[in-house]
């Protein structure tokens, strides 16, 4: 088909050369022609060919000057260039290759040899592009990896500070791997991401940020209803992927946190951080839904998983119970932590347990206050270190921008100190620069006398 042919731009001020090229290339390539370097640069502003064939000796702007100007445009800098010239001196060839030309073909030339050399250059370029794409994509799912996805979001926001960030986390995905094996889990991920890739258009791209955490970014302004529809579509796509691959598995689903540029932020890290807070809200309120980030959660649009109306006891139990295979500390929001703390102070005189509270504080060694970066990266790492170091009966919450508070149930001061030191060492093992970790310990005392 004509559209499958590679597109070549030929720049030569001699009309007979252009006519000859058109005849030679007609069966192998799609050819565009310009008679001057100036016109060719204007052409490149609108159309990006697969290769440029360039004469050296042209009036006003010679081939060398054209190549210099072309390389200044980031969108054209990597287009391969072949010099086609009557110059026979070695210095011209050396100069051309040093400037970045892929080949130097002297006139007169054998048409078939020239066509073969151009095909070979284009083949090499295709391989380079394929390797470049592979280096930026997740090998399992085909989505962009975190680094490239972050670069794309930042580049997009620099040009147009509007867009919507969807942070996607698969709920209880470990259940699939534990029940059906990792091959089945990978199959679900591939199926889900295939559906996401179908959604991706010029204004939308998707990435795998790690494990079972994904993100979708849509350029430009969206109405609230459009954002909701997209979030629901992402949720439905995963549910379909699970059903198609393994059938129904209770507790497995998807939660989505949403942040909006530029209302919530103007760069990847800020939007990621805000979407992560919204995602955390979903996780703490029944999972399997979406949530918009807002400073005051009471003003946000609620997740569809939170319904009003009468429910049965089984539905209630399914909504509030925690999966039995959860490990590590119980992570809650600050308000929930306050309620738990108050409950413990009410009951501690009856249980006779030793309960200690730990406060971990991150300090920036340079006294900087880049809270968005700290919360998005450093604090999240600390949360995981703490959560993985504690028991299921312990509790943790993010208390401020750079602080995490922990309740250790049935633990002496000596045991609490050992736990804190272990967390400190594991955090140091993460090799996070510019931050140090401090902690304080205090035993929780009952604040009232029980009335029998």
Image (cartoon, grey):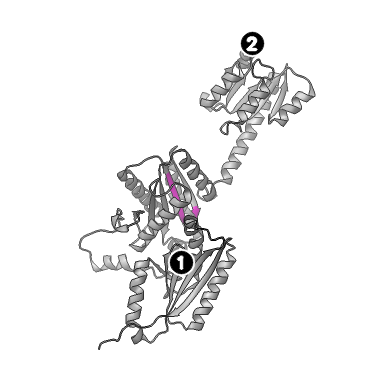
Please state the horizontal and vertical placement of residue 379, each as a whole percent of the image: 49, 62
Give above or below for 253 relative to 78.
below
Residue 315 within the segment the image draws in magenta:
no
Residue linked to disc 2: 16
Residue furthest to the top = 16
Give above or below for 172 relative to 192.
below
Quadrant of residue 397 within the rendered picture: bottom left
Considering depth in this image, is 161 or 109 the residue closer to the camera?
161
Residue furthest to the right = 90
Q: Residues in magenta?
A: 209-217
Residue linked to disc 1: 403
| SS class, disc 2 | helix
Quadrant of residue 114 within the rendered picture: top right
Residue furthest to the bottom = 452
Q: Residue at x 50, y 49 (%)?
A: 141
Quadrant of residue 98 within the rendered picture: top right
Please state the horizontal and vertical placement of residue 414, each as a whole percent of the image: 51, 83
Q: Residue at x 31, y 65 (%)?
A: 319
- The residue mark sitting in front, 2 or 1, is 1
Residue 53 visible (yes or no): yes
């Amino acid at each position: 088909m004509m559209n499958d042919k590679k597109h070549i731009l030929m720049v030569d001020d001699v009309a007979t050369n252009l006519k000859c090229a058109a005849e030679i290339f007609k069966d192998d390539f799609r050819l565009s022609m310009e008679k001057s370097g100036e016109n060719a640069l204007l052409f490149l502003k609108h159309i990006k060919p697969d290769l440029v064939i360039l004469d050296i000796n042209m009036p006003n702007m010679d081939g060398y000057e054209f190549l210099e100007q072309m390389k200044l445009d980031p969108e054209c800098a990597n287009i391969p260039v072949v010099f086609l010239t009557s110059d026979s001196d070695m210095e011209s060839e050396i100069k051309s290759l040093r400037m970045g030309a892929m080949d130097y073909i002297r006139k007169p030339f054998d048409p078939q040899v020239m066509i073969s050399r151009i095909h070979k250059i284009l083949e090499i370029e295709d391989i380079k592009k394929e390797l470049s794409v592979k280096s930026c994509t997740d090998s399992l799912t085909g989505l962009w990896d975190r680094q490239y996805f972050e670069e794309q979001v930042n580049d997009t926001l620099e040009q147009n500070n509007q867009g919507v960030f969807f942070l996607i986390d698969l709920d209880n995905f470990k259940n699939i791997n534990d029940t059906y094996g990792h091959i089945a889990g990978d199959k679900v991920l591939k199926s889900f991401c295939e559906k996401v890739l179908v959604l991706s258009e010029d204004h939308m791209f998707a990435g795998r940020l790690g494990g079972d955490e994904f993100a979708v970014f849509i350029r430009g302004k969206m109405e609230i209803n459009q954002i909701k529809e997209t979030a629901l579509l992402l949720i439905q796509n995963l549910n379909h992927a699970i059903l198609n691959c393994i059938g129904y598995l209770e507790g497995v689903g998807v939660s989505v946190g949403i942040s909006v540029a530029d209302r919530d932020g103007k760069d990847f890290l800020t939007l990621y951080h805000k979407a992560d807070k919204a995602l955390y809200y979903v996780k703490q309120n029944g999972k399997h839904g979406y949530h918009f980030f807002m400073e005051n959660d009471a003003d946000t649009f609620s997740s569809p998983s939170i319904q009003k109306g009468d429910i049965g006891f089984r539905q209630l139990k399914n909504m509030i119970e925690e999966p039995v295979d959860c490990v590590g500390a119980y992570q809650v929001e600050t308000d929930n932590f306050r309620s738990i703390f108050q409950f413990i102070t009410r009951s501690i005189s009856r249980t006779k347990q030793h309960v200690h509270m730990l406060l971990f504080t991150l300090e920036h060694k340079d006294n900087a206050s880049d809270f968005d970066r700290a919360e998005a990266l450093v604090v999240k790492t600390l949360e995981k270190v703490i959560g993985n170091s504690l028991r299921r009966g312990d509790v943790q919450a993010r208390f401020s921008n750079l602080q995490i508070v922990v309740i250790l149930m049935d633990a002496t001061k000596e045991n609490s100190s050992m736990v804190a030191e272990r967390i400190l060492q594991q955090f140091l093992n993460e090799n996070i620069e510019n931050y140090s970790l401090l902690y304080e310990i205090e035993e929780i005392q009952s604040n009232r006398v029980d009335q029998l």
